[in-house]
Structure formats: structure tokens, C-alpha cells
Image (cartoon, grey):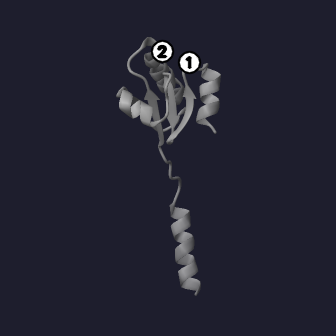
Amino acid sequence: MGGSSKFIQAIFEGIKFIQIKMEIKVLGTGCAKCKKLEDLIKEVVTEMGIEANIEKVEDIYKIMQYGVMRTPGLVIDGKVVLTGRLPKSKELRELLTK
């Protein structure tokens, strides 16, 4: 028994940190607000040091699959968190840390 518990302890000590990337999608067909949201999200993610995959979704049919009827839209880890407006940087930070 003692050998196996030491082995398990060694495994846990060997694991330092596993970081999971956040999945972020900016929904918009290319209007100025949609482009601004994309730039803003990239800026805030970089400032906060968040590992994230950021994707711009411009296909109207894919946007509609999220139930978004007003753009820009913001999806974080599969959940629509914002539609139809540009958030302030402070609000984006809050959305990214929920």
C-alpha cells in the first residue's frame, strides 16, 4: 500500500498547472461595432493574461443558431453573454471572470 500512495503523491506533485483555454466567439457580419468588439475583446484578453481561442463568426446562419438577432454578440465558452451593444472594458473583464 505504501508504494502506491507514494506513486500517487508523486503524480500530484508533478502536475504543476493545467490551463484550459477559454473559447470566445464574436458574432457579427462585419459592421463597425462588431469589428470594435473583436478588437476590444482581444485587447482585454491580452491585458488580463487569459489564454483564449477567439473566433469571429460572420455567417448569419451560424449567428442565428445562437439565437442572436442583434449584433454584435459575444459567446464565452458556448454561452451567449452579450448582444446588440458594445460593452465597456470593465464589463468585459467581469464577463471574462465569471
Q: Is residue 54 visible?
A: no
- Marker disc for residue 64: none
Q: Nearer the viewer, residue 25 or 49?
A: 25
Which quarter of the rendered picture does the N terminus lie within? bottom right
Classify 10 Å Cα crowding around label 2: few (below 14), some (14-19), many (20 and above). Answer: some
Above/below status of 78 relative to 54:
below
Residue furthest left in the image: 59
Q: Is residue 76 visible?
A: yes
**Amino acid type, mark 1:** Leu
Residue furthest bottom in the image: 1
Residue contact between numbered discs 1 and 2, judged by CB atoms under 8 Å: yes
Circle 2 is placed at which residue position? 33
Query: Whole-percent x and y of residue 55?
Result: 40, 32
Circle 1 is placed at which residue position? 86
Q: Nearer the viewer, residue 34 or 4?
A: 34
Classify 10 Å Cα crowding around label 1: few (below 14), some (14-19), many (20 and above). Answer: some
Q: Residue at x 62, y 37 (%)?
A: 97
Query: Whole-percent x and y of residue 77?
Result: 51, 42
Above/below status of 59 relative to 23:
above
Name the N-terminal-most of marks 1 and 2.
2
**Amino acid type, mark 2:** Lys
Q: Nearer the viewer, residue 50 or 56?
A: 56
Q: Residue at x 54, y 74 (%)?
A: 8
Above/below status of 86 relative to 66:
above
Q: Residue at x 47, y 43 (%)?
A: 21
Which secondary structure lies at badge 2?
Answer: helix
